[in-house]
Image: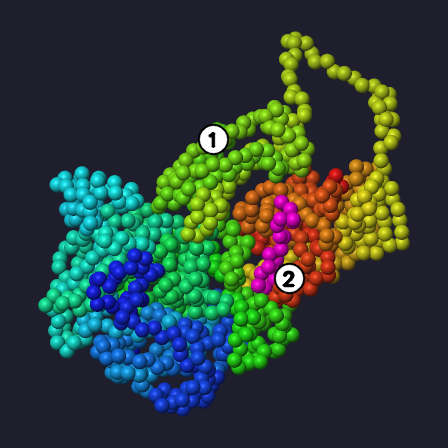
Amino acid sequence: MTQLPSQGYFYPYDTMDELYTEKHPPEFGRLPSLWKLELPKWRFFHAKFKEDVPENWTAPEFDDSKWDLIDVPSVWQMQGYGYPSELVYEKNALLSKKTSKLQQRLADDAAMENTNDYGLYRVWVNLPAQFINRFVYFVTDGIVGNYTITVNGKQVSASRSTFSTTKCLLNEALHEGANLITVAVRRFDIRMEKGKLKKNVRAQGAFGFSGLFRLPYLVAESSVEISSVRLFTSWLTDTLARDVVPKTALVNSLYRSDNDDQLTDREKEILPDAQIRRDAGMNVEIELMNHLPYDMQVTVNCRLMEARDEYDLYNLPEHRLNQRKALTDTIPKDGVKILGTEFYAKLVLPWTDQTPNLYDLLIEVRDNKDQVICVKKQRFGFRSISYSESIIHVNDLAVPIHGVKYYEFDPENGISVPLERFRQDILLMKAGNINTIYVVHHPTDSRFFDLCDRYGMYVILQSAAAVLPQTVYSLINHPCIIMWSMTGRKFEEGAYLDVKERINAFDAKRPLYCEIDNTGRVSDMPPFPNKAGMLFGQWCDLCVNRPYLRSRLKEDKVLFESIMARPRRDEDTMDLKYIHQGDLVEYSEQIGVSIAQGIVDANRVPHPIFYEVKKQCEGIKIFASAENPSILTVHNVSPFGATPAIELKWQLMLGGIRLTGGSGIVPPISALGNREMQFPIEVGDFVTSLWGTKYPKAQDTYNQAVCKELILDIRLTLANDACYAKAGYEVAFYQQILVDEVCDPSSQTPVWEEEPEGEEPTIQIIEAASLADGLILDENKPRVKVLTAPALIFAQIKNVQYGFSRREGGLCSIRIDGKEYFDGLMEPSFYRAASNIDRADKSYVLSQTVFSHETDWRTIQSEMQFVGTFYEMDGEDFHLICKYKSTGMKGPILVHYRVKTDGRLLATLEFVPKFDLVRYGFRVPIDSMSHLGWYGRGSGESYSDRKESQRIGWFTTLENSLYHEYARPAENGAHADTRYLLLQLDDVKGLSIHKNKLEPFSFSCMPYMPEDLDDYAHQELMPTDGRTHLYLDFYMKGVERGPDVLARRGLQKNARYEETIEFAPKY
C-alpha cells in the first residue's frame, strides 16, 4: 500500500461542542482528539550494514528488550549512532563542477556514501475496539531515508523519504488489543533515474541525517472521512458585497436594523480593528472519502470563527456566512467526492505579515438522518495573492520580498527541530525586519507554517518537482505561503511543465518559482534578486553541538572513529564547541574548507551580517527636508498595519560627543503613512561662533571633539513589548551630517566692512628685517634629537620617543612619558584572512597554489624582505626610509617615516603591486593592556561593502568587542570609515592615529594574526602570543559577494599606491 498525501494536523472530532470547551485553547487551536494517538517512544536498533539486521525482527514474538529506548521525533545520528555526512547547504557545494573524480570519491567515502546502515524501530500500541472499528491511519510529517512500515509482521507501506504529511491505512493488519508497528529506515534514499532504480541517494537538505525526524501518530477516521479541505479567499467589491454578504457580521451581533448602511456603521463601532476589515468571499472544496461498502448521502455544514488566544465561551466570535449553494450530495461506496461552494462573510480581518489575523473553518458532516458523522477544523487567513511583472501583490498591494534561505536545522537535534527553535527563528527574523522565508529543498514541520501564520511571515516553499503536488496538497491552506518553488538535481523542462500544470490545476493563485529554470517557461518569477525583492543568504550555521553529541555516543569511543577515509586528528578528543563541515571532510590543508555559515550562528546568536540585513530592511524610514534639515519625516514603509508605539530618542553630536537631545513617543503611523516633526536645531548657527552662546559647555565640547563634524542621531525603539522584542529594542536609526566642520565658538565672527568707492585697497608692506627679528623669538622651538645604537635608531622630541629597527626595518617603539605603546615591529600589511565566502570561492582557493586575479598574498607577506634603511635630518624634521622587496611588487616597497618637531610621526607607504590587492596598510603588535577609542563606525564591525548598519560616533573597547567568534575562524573585526583612533594606557594620555584632514581609514584589533584565522578550524584551537595585533588599513577588500565589482576583486594591479598615516601624542 502506498503512502497517501494528507493535510497536516487535520484531526477528527465527534461534535462541534468539543471545539470550544476551554477559555484558553492550545496553541494553534490544536485541541486534543479522542481519535489521535501519538507515538513518541520506540525501541531502536542501529544496523551498520544490511547483514547486521536481525532475522525476523518485525515479528511480534521477536525479543527487543535489549534494544535502546529512543525518543521520537529524532534522527539517530544525534542519538549517538553515526554522524551526519555533510554540513553544507548544497551537496558538494564546496567542490567545483571541475573537481576531480578522486576528490569527489574521497568526499563521498568520508560521508559514508558506501554504507548501508539501517535504523530499526519497534513500538507496541494497545488499541481498544472503538478505535479499531474506525479507519486507522499511520500518519507522519517526515521520515528521512527509504523506509518500510509493517504492522503485526505484515508490510503495509514502503516509500522514499517523506517531508510532508502522508498517511497509510492499517486496518487490514490491526486487531483489538496489542499491535506491533515497525519501521525500517535505510539511511540513504532511492530514486528513479532514466527508468532505473538508483540507490545510495542522499536526500537533499537532510545533511545525511536519518530516521523518524517528525512525530508519527495514529488517527482513527470516521466512516465518511473529511480527507481534505481547500480554501481560496478573495475580496468583494462594494457592489457585489451588498448582494451576497450577510446583513450582520457576527452571529451574536448587538445591533439589528432595517438600514444596511446604518447597521454596518454601528457594527464597525464595536468591532476591533474595524478600519482594516473587509467583505470577503471564500471558495471551499471539501474532499470526502466513503469507507463504507454502500453509498452515503451526506450534508456538510460550515461555520466561521475568529481565532483568538482567549474566548468568551458564551459569546463566541462567530461570523455569519451566506453560501452560494448547499453542500449536499451522495458519496459512492469506497469512493471519493469533492463538494464545493462559495461562502460570503462580512467585515473579516485580513491576513498579512503585519496583521496576521486567523480564522477557523468548522466543518461538520451529517448523514441523511441528521446524525453527525464527523467534525474537523481548518485554520486559515483571508488574503489574496497575485503577481504582475515579477512583483508579488498581497491583498492587492505590492509587497517587497526581504527574505532569507531557511534550512531546517538545530545544533542538538539535526533536522528534527523543536517548536521553540522554530519560534526563536521566526521572532528573530521579525526583529531583523525580514518578512519572507525561503524554505529550501523540502517543507519544514507543519508547526513551522503555523508559527508563520500566527506571527506574520511570508513563505516561499520549495520541494522536489516529483513530490511538489503532494506538498501543495498538504499545506495549501496556510496563508503564509505566497509562492511554491520547484527544484531537482537537473532541469528537465518537459517534466517540470507537467508538474506546473498539475499545480496550477490545484492552486491557480500562487506563482511558481524555479531558480534552475534556464528557459523562462517554467518559473513565473525570474531568479532573485528581482523586482519582487531579494534573498540575503542562508539563515543559520549548520554546526552540531559537539559536547552534546559526544555525550550521546553509543558505538564510538571517540568522535568520528567510525567515519571511513577520514584520518584521526588531535582535536577529535578536545573540548570544542562545534562540529562543522571541516571536521567531516577536508580537501585543502592550507586554506581549510568553507563551512555552512549563515546570518546567525547555530545557536541563533546574530553574526555581524544580521545587523546589515536589519538596516536594509527597516520598516520605518526617516527623510530630511531639502529646505530645512531640522524638519524630518518619519515614514511607515509597510503597506499593511500601523507602526507600534515608538520612542524616538535624538541627540546632536559633535565629534561623537552629545551636545543636546531629547526623547518622545511617536504615536502609531498608519500603513504607508507619514509623520512630520521639527527638531530645535538651527543648522546655520554652527557655521559661525554664535552656536557657542546657545549650548552649555560648547567650548569644552568643541575642544574635546577629535572631529568637528555635527551629526543628528536618531534612534527609534519599541515603547512597549512586542512578540519579537522587549520595550527599548531599536527598530531603526537615522544619522545625518549637518555640518562637516563647525566653527570654533571662541573665534570672532568676521565683520565685513565695505570699501569706500573709488579708493584702491591699501597693501601693508612688511620689511624683511622686521620679519627676521620676529623669527628670532622661535629660538627655543623644540628640535628632534637622534640617538643611535647598533640595532636601533631613536628620534625623540620632548617626552615622545620613536624607535626604529635597523635589522628588521620599520617603526618598533613609541614611548610617551616613558610608557611603551608598541610591542613589536610595524611593517607593511598586504594579507587578509579568508572570509567564509572566500573559502567557498574556487578562484580564491586556487590562488593558494597558482597566481590568479586574487593571488596568494599570504606567501607574498611572509616572503617580503627588508633591504635596508636610510635616515637623515631634513631641516628640523627627522626622515627615515625603509626599503623592502617582494615578488608581488614591481619595484621596492617604500615606507617613509617623518618625525615632526611638534611630536607627530608621519608614515607613508608606497608600492606598485603585480596582482590585485586584497588589503594594504600597516600591521603592528601593541600593548595588550591598552584600550582603544575611535571616531567612526561602530560598535560592530564594518567593511566597504557592509557598513550601513553601523552608526557614526565615538566608541571604546571598554564597552565593545572588536572580535567576532565564528564557528570556523575567519576574517572579521574591521572598522571602516574610521576618522580618528586613540590608544590609551590610562584615562588621560594616549597615542592618536589618523590620516591627513581626518580622512577615513579602516582598523582592526585582535589577539590573533590573519595566518591563525586561516590555519585553525576552531576558535578553541587558535594560538595567541599574548600580544594584541593592530591593523591600520588604507584599503580592505569587501567580505561579501555582492554586485560591487571593486569590493569583490580588490584594487587593480600595476598602479602606484601611496598613503600616509599619522601618529601623535594625545594629552
Label disc, if present, on residue 132 of the rendered structure:
none
SS of the residue at dot 2?
helix
Q: Residues within 10 Å of mark 1 (few under 14, many from 20)?
A: few
Along the viewing direction, whichever of 869 and 132 lies nearer the viewer: 132
The spot of residue 910 in percent (x, y) is 72, 48
The spot of residue 324 in percent (x, y) is 14, 55
Q: Three-letter amino acid code at disc 2?
A: Leu
In the image, residue 680 above or below residue 1043: above
Q: Report the residue at 53% width, 77% height from top.
A: 553
Q: Earlier in the sequence, mark 1 or mark 2?
A: 1
Q: Report the residue at 46% width, 55% height from top.
A: 428
Q: Which residues are drawn in magenta?
A: 955-971
Visible in this render: residue 392? Answer: no
Q: Report the residue at 23% width, 77% height from top.
A: 130
Visible in this render: residue 808? Answer: yes
Question: Relative to 839, is 355 on the left or the right?
Answer: left
The structure's colour scheme is rainbow
Q: Quadrant of the C terminus?
A: top right
The residue pinned by badge 1 equals 678
Front position among marks 1 and 2: 1
Label disc, if present, on residue 1013 of the rendered structure:
2
